[in-house]
Image (tube, helix red, strand yellow):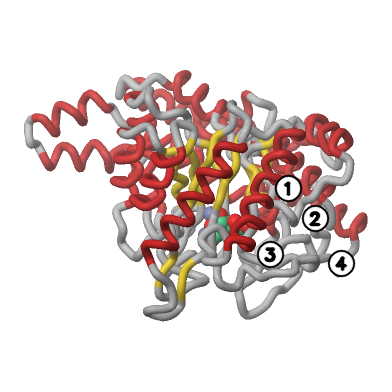
Amino acid sequence: MRIHQNQISEINKQKSDEHHREFSFLSNSLIKREVDVSWILQKLSDFQVAIPSWALGAGGTRFGRFSYAGEPASLEEKLDDIGILHLLTNAAGSVSLHIPWDIPEDISAIKEIAKSNKLLFDAVNSNTFQDQPDMKMSYKFGSLSNADAVIRMKAIEHNIEVVKLGNALGSKSLTVWLADGSNFPGQQNFQSALKLTQESLQHIYKAMPEDWKLFIEYKPYEPNFYSTVIQDWGTSFMLANACGERAFTLVDLGHHLPNTNIEQIVATLMMKGKLGGFHFNDSKYGDDDLTVGSIKPYALFLIFNELVFGMEKNSQNPTPAWMIDASHNVKDPLEDLIQSLEAIMIAYAQALLIDQNLLRQAQQDHDVVLCQEILQNAYRTDVRPLVREARLLNNAALYPVDAYRELAVRRSLIDERGTKTVATGL
Ligand code: AOS
Ligand code: ZN
Ligand code: ZN
Ligand code: ZN
């Protein structure tokens, strides 16, 4: 362990007066608004987001990759990094692995490291969007949708291997994201590509243990720029239905055409009990994978409003698997993840402030102005003291970025791992 809880407590002490002043001011005004503050604190404390193993190094763009000093070179080191995040934020309680980027050599040793960092294994991700060095065939023209049965089978088998590995670690779900699609009109027969994908997914689904879930990600473009086989939530939803009741749609915030009403997609899927997983990130143009909340925090809040409503009202929908899916080139990856976690907690806290009964009544009365007031009053409340208090109650850092800097975490990672590091993965 690079940092200890008592170091965090020491740092918290320096700022605890200031925090308590802000927190009591906020909680007093919330109590006047009949908000149940301790209920919100509990919800915030319980909310855990999986960290993708590929976000721990400075990723990059398709034009280049600039490594960040002190990056983790192995799965063990990645787990240690997430352990640091979890200690600072009490919000990063699990990891999402990517196979083959994270092949564990010694399963029980990896489980031990995860346990000592208080981490669980969330969804495992398969990879049929890259050819692996030992491969005799290529995914260049698709994987689960490939017209060649031998290549399809290879992709199916890879997914089954990933499930086996994940199962040994204690994971309970598989996320499938496909790059399959076409670049030019006429290149691919839409119907057969979709039909083959469905058959392949059914095959994988049947091979999963009975307590496993399958998450199917959709994306309208990239790397194929004319068509992708699973282009939208409707296609994913249809495929999930064709697989069975433990197959679900996964929403990645970056996987929509500009201005898509993502909150409405969330609501629709939850009504049908089919929102299985979530990839948080932010974007201005496409699948930019930027820090959560860095571009469109209001949209994130509106999405959380639907998530909160759905989690309360749609018992047919399991609690979605929350995950960050971000990657970029310029920030310290750990500081960036702290910022993403903070943005998620803020949006969640704001959404929890909404009086759903009052909103319902205003909708019923067609009082459009009041509806907007209710949403925006919640959004414009500075909930940061609530988020901090939830962390404090769990012995995490009041101000995680500050604590991270004060404890010189990156410095010690560089001392240990060196300056010229390249995290495995993207
Ligand atoms: C790709 O665009 C998807 O968002 C995937 O979820 C993910 O980024 C990829 O699987 C990384 O391995
Ligand atoms: Zn994703
Ligand atoms: Zn993506
Ligand atoms: Zn993305």
Which percent across, then down, holds residue 298? 36, 51
Q: Which mark is residue 410?
A: 2
Distance of mark 1 from mark 3, alpha carbons? Answer: 25 Å
Ligand number 1: quarter of image: bottom right
Question: Could you tell me which residue is drawn at 49 percent across and 47 percent down?
Answer: 216
* Cβ atoms at labels 2 and 3 below 8 Å apart: no
Which percent across, then down, holds residue 68? 76, 66
For the residue labelled by badge 4, is the local secondary structure a helix, a strand or a loop? loop
**First in residue order: circle 2 vs circle 3:** 2
**First in residue order: circle 4 vs circle 2:** 2
Residue matched to label 4 = 419
Residue matched to label 1 = 404
Distance of mark 2 from mark 1, alpha carbons? Answer: 8 Å
Q: For label 1, count other residues whose C-alpha is less than 10 Å away and answer few (under 14), some (14-19) or many (20+).
A: many
Distance of mark 4 from mark 2, alpha carbons? Answer: 10 Å
Q: For label 4, count other residues whose C-alpha is less than 10 Å away and answer few (under 14), some (14-19) or many (20+).
A: some
